[in-house]
Amino acid sequence: FQDATKRPSAKDLLDTDLMKSRALIENLKIQKGLAEDRTFEAEEKAEITDSINQNLQKELNKMKSKHVSDAVIMFFIFATLITFVAIWIITYKSNTKIGISLKEANERINILEKPNLILLQMAKILKQPVIGSEEEQEEIRRQKKEICALINSSLYKKEDNELRKKIINSGIAKALIAMQL
């Protein structure tokens, strides 16, 4: 066990890039949920619009059957159109609130998660035991060599601490150590 004075504090652990990425992903998922709510509201407003349109048609048919003057019918249509436009303006404003769309949220989540998923997959391959037929063993060794070469070229003479942290957090470092034992 490490000396208590050398251990990172809770604040240091929470300030790691992995935790920040997870917090950002959670925030994006919340925004995605809000975008889904706005989509549901837009669907409800579309249903209301359809209902208004059907009621308008019924009223127009009643007026025509009662031989109401054209001026009254035109006034009724004008008033209904104003209501219709107001509903669409409200719908447009509610769908363009500050925030991100559902598609944007999914894209941002994928962009943030993809590098971590790739590193986790690399760690999984490195941890895989070299067993099976001769061809399978050779394929596993080839994959491990490719991953090691990729990691080496990514880190050689570079001070990319962000990538180093991600490699450690994904389990690649432990897998490389286990391969040497």
Image (tube, rainbow, N blue to C red):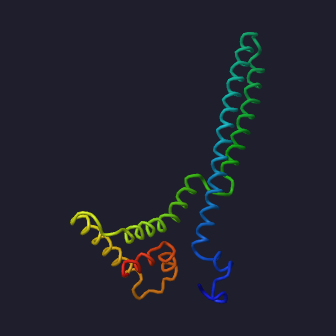
Q: Residue furthest left?
A: 134
Question: In the figure, 155 relative to 88: above or below?
Answer: below
At which x and y percent is residue 7? 63, 85
Residue closer to the observer: 146 or 3: 3
Q: Is residue 99 above or below residue 63?
A: below
**Rendered view: 30 above or below 19:** above
On screen, residue 29 versus residue 123, left or right, reads: right
Q: Tell me what residue is drawn at x 51 percent, y 64 percent.
A: 113
Q: x, y (%) of residue 43?
A: 64, 38
Picture quadrant of residue 176? bottom left
Residue occupying the far top of the picture: 66
Give the image location of residue 28, x and y in percent. Answer: 61, 60
Q: Quadrant of residue 23?
A: bottom right
Going by the image, does 127 lie left or right of 98? Answer: left
Quick check: 3 left or right of 63? left
Say which residue appears at 51% left-offset and 83% top-offset: 161
